[in-house]
Every structure is written in structure tokens, then in C-alpha cells.
Image (spheres, rainbow, N blue to C red):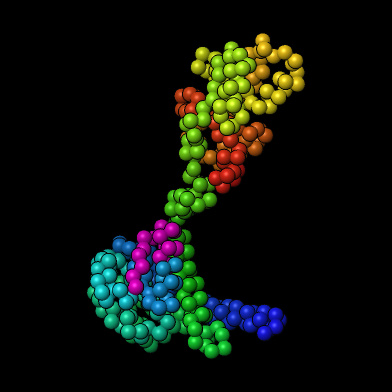
Amino acid sequence: METEEILKIGEQIIESEITEVKRMKGNLTLNFSECVQAMFSAKGKIVVVGVGKNAPIAQKMVATLNSTGTVSQFLHAGEALHGDVGLIQKEDVCLILSKSGNTAEIKSSLPSIKQFSAKTIAITGNLNSYLARNCDIVLDATVEKEAGVLNLAPTSSTTVQLVLCDAIAMTLQQMKGFTGNDFGKFHPGGSLGKQLLLKVEDMLDETQKPEVNIDAPIKEVIQSLSSGRFGITVVKDQNEIVGVVTDGDLRRMLEKYTDFSHLKARDIASLNPKTIKKSILARKALRLINEHKIGQLVVVDDNNEYVGIIDFHGLTNEGIRAE
């Protein structure tokens, strides 16, 4: 098969699925609103039921709902017949996905699902099916043709189900007033979660806290700089932060003096260093670093006590972006 023919087939498959999604959009009725309202008002969780090729779509719906503020759980229709139906509680709403609505697992498990749950909602491509006739709310996921010349493998039908599930989940998200901060709370390990939630104190290495007295000799200053990985040491006077000495300050000292044995920390320190409270969001620390074109910030607690150092590379390596 030549490249042009392969590309043409791919384009036809995509266009076929786009056509079916557009058709599904036109099939939205008041039932969609009833479905969303029922799920929004549910006092329990949302149980999403699937079998066969619909099962991964159901699982993806569960993941989307859970990450956007609607507690849900997946139930395989086949496993429901062997005890898993017990996960359904009387206040739960069940969303059931099936193209035909007549599979053996669906027909066998539906009576128990209805008995245990508060309400059943079907997403099916067969409005005359057993599933459609026996659910409280039915959403039309009919497709005229599966993508591909054989019209057999579930392709357009699963795409339509996926898009319809996304429409439900995102409408619920909006109705719940779910915010970016809420999303970050549910994704603490992702870059968005870190951006929204990670504080300066979460990134501090308590073993990296170099400091010297303002009258410390240069040898001690150099040893303090070498002991840490940030290329900076804090200069204190009677336990108060008065300055910092950086690798850059040390280089400037070497350029200026031929004999520096008599020098002390006060002679080369950069005074009034930029500080940040440990409770501040990490992204604000990066913004401050960028604004002042510096490499590090001195971190303090609410009493302005020195607690550590935070630097540009540590922030960016964690995926933090400036505001």
C-alpha cells in the first residue's frame, strides 16, 4: 500500500468519526439535562458500568469524574454478576454504557443494579434495547456506521460514548463551581498541582542552611560556600540576617584584592538580601527570582528566622513556572 493511500484511509476514518460526533450533538435532548441533574443531585457516588469495548470508556469516565469533583467508581457488568454489584449503595446513581444494550452481561446484571441504586442512566446506541427500556434516563449514542470498511469494530460508537461522557463530566464540573485550585488539589503530583499548591517550605532541604557571622574570616566564608550546593551563604549579625555572600561576590573579591587574608564577611557581603516566607507559593518565589535577576532567595519563617535557601534550578526542575 502506497503512502498516499494510507494517508487517505486515515483521513476517511477520522472524518467518519467526526461525522458521528456531530450527529450525536444534534441528538442531545432534555434527557441530557436530566442525566446531569440526576448526577449533580446524587447523594452517593456515581457508578459507571461497562463491558467489552465500553469498559475502557467507562473507566475513563470514572477517572474524569473523580478528578473534577464527582466521586465515582467503575463496575464491570460481568463482575457485577459475581458479587461486585455489592459496591452499589442505595444513594448511588448508575451510568451504564452499552452500544447494543442487549449483551448478556447487561441483561443479567441490570435488575440487580436497579435494585441497589437510586437511579439508572443508559448511554446506548440502541434506543429499543433491553437497557434503554429499563433505565430511568436514556441518552442516545446511536451511530449510523462504524469507521472502517467492515463496519464491525467499535470505533465511532466508542468515540461518541467518550465525547458524550466528557460532555456530562465537564457540565458537572461547571455546575459544581470546580476551580483550577480544586483541580490542583486532586493532582498534587502533576505539574498543575505543583503550580497551584507547592509552597516554598515543601521544597526546602533542611540540611542545606549555610551561614556565617558578619565578622567571619574569608577562609570560613569560603568553607561555608563550599559546604552547600547553592553557591550562597547567609551573613548574620547577632542572629539577624544582614546579607549574603555568593560565588559572584567571591569572584569579585578575587578580582579586586591581591591580598584578602585580612578581609571578613562584612567586607564582601551583598547587604539586604531578598527573602521570602516559607509559607509562600513556590511559583511566587520563582517570579521574585526572575524579577530581581538573582539565582537564590533566603527563606524565612513567620518570625523572620532563617530556615534555608531556595534557588532557580530547584524550582524549575520541579516544573514550577513563574506567574
Q: Is residue 186 above or below residue 51?
A: above
**Is any atom of residue 172 visible in this view?**
no
Residue visible at 40% across and 85% down in the picture:
100
Residue 164 is situated, as x and y percent measured from the top left of the image, at 47, 73
Q: Nearer the viewer, residue 166 or 7?
A: 7
Total labels drawn: 0
Residue 44 is situated, as x and y percent measured from the top left of the image, at 30, 62
Residue 154 is situated, as x and y percent measured from the top left of the image, at 48, 81
Query: Which of the image's four quarters has the C terminus?
Result: top right
Residue 103 is situated, as x and y percent measured from the top left of the image, at 35, 84
**Is any atom of residue 315 visible in this view?**
yes
Q: Nearer the viewer, residue 57 or 246?
A: 246
Tell me the magenta residue range: 61-76
Residue visible at 57% across and 88% down in the picture:
149
For the view shown, which residue lies furthest in the bottom direction?
A: 150
- The answer to which image quadrant residue 88 occupies is bottom left
Query: Which of the image's four quarters has the N terminus?
Result: bottom right
**Residue 63 falls inside the magenta stretch:** yes
Q: Tell me: 6 left or right of 258.
A: left
Q: Nearer the viewer, residue 119 or 5?
A: 5
Residue visible at 37% across and 70% down in the picture:
48
Q: Nearer the viewer, residue 114 or 310?
A: 310
Q: Is residue 139 above or below residue 271?
A: below
**Residue 69 falls inside the magenta stretch:** yes
